[in-house]
Amino acid sequence: MELDPRSLVVAGLMDAALLGVIALVFASREGATRTIGTWGAAMVTLAIGLGGVAAQGVVPDLVSVALANSVIVGALVLALRSLRLMRGQTGRDALGWGMVALVFVLQVVFLDVLPAYRARVVVISSAMALLFARGALVLHPEVPEEAQRSFRFTEYVLWAAAALTLARAASAFHDRAYGLLAPGMLRASTFLFYISAITSATLGVLWMQIQLLQRDLVRLARVDPLTDVLNRGAFLREFEREVSRAEREGGTFSLAIFDLDRFKLLNDHYGHPLGDQALKAFTEILQGAIRKHDVIGRYGGEEFALLMPNTDEETATRVAERVRREVESRGIEVAGRRIELTVSGGVATFGLDGLDWNSLLSAADTAMYDAKAAGRNQVVSASRRPPGRAAMA
């Protein structure tokens, strides 16, 4: 049984239109990104181009050949834009739109000026292959581990489409037919592959977007959005894991609590935006002053917790003191003016000052307030607390 190429083009048209509408509906939902909306627009544009191709013999060749093929290339440029947006790149593509214009001009030339069906096939196939390859290259660089499979799947679909399209260009020199819709296994197989590629690539894009959204949801559940460190809940889970490890292996670890000095006055005098800037500046300093295996969490407000695995009281106090000195020396810059920023800290060690979160937190918190009572801008170890305590902000 021989498949009719025109029927396959219509099937591809319906497939692209349906996938485009699904993508646009998905994009209209709250929280969706521009990626899916742009991909949906690309699929609808592709359906329009395929509609022009299917109308060959019914409408003028200028529309069904030159314009329709150019619209198909434009649809691939939009699809490439979608992938670039997903990777956080600019959506501008002068090369892509230049290719659309060039394809239209060459299609007109090889249609009316120098009629050559094979040349038209080579032009459109080469342009499509280049765009497929560009899309695959956009997806190729390192991606988040959570979305690895979806990115690789879509990349491989695009590489396959590029390879087949180049093969189609090469086969044009041996094609005895003189029309895209002429009967033949070569054209029928090509259209069947493109229908599969359209569907697979769209599913791949949706899969990538879903996995990225899932990653963001997991991140929101774990990370403080302002400072980009663990929130309280996620930090407590890390703490429990460290307790379990220490009990199992007989090790130890330390906990430090930091509180920015006079933070309320900073907010009242300069405004909350500067307060937010101070919190972010402190976390950057903290991340730069600690070791790779240490864990930072925002305990609440201007208080931060630092979990230091395999660390005794003496080493933990040195780490906390290093953080304090770095904060004092750097401060924060506002409109070219340096504003002083200091921090007080308290350190508690597992086994020495407590055996669970409540006891260690209480010990570290009390030591931190002792540091404030002693004049702020210092670090106190819970095992070396000075007598007396006064709560200060």
Image: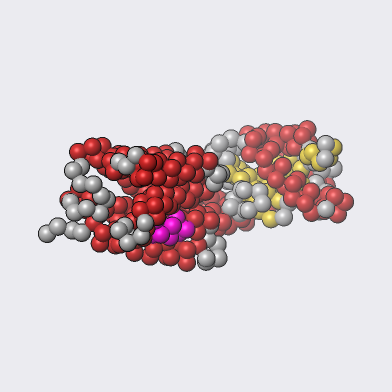
User: In the image shown, does 339 or 324 lie closer to the viewer?
Assistant: 339
Say if 378 sits above or below 203 in the image.
above
Name the residue: 77% across, 51% down: 273
Name the residue: 43% across, 45% down: 104
Q: Quadrant of residue 58?
A: bottom left
Name the residue: 22% across, 53% down: 182
User: In the image shown, does 172 or 11 lie closer to the viewer?
Assistant: 172
Say if 300 sits above or below 339 in the image.
below
Name the residue: 56% across, 36% down: 292
| x then y, percent, for residue 378 | 77, 39
Magenta region, residue range = 40-49
Q: Residue furthest left?
A: 1
Majority secondary structure of magenta residues: helix
User: In the image shown, does 241 or 162 lie closer to the viewer?
Assistant: 162
User: In the image shown, does 272 or 291 lie closer to the viewer?
Assistant: 272
Say if 381 sits above or below 69 in the image.
above
Q: Is residue 157 left or right of residue 185?
A: right
| x then y, percent, for residue 348 | 65, 45
**Residue 193 seen in render:** no
Q: Residue furthest front?
A: 113
Q: Residue furthest right?
A: 269
Give yes or no for residue 43 being in the magenta stretch: yes
**Residue 308 seen in render:** yes
| x then y, percent, for residue 166 | 30, 39
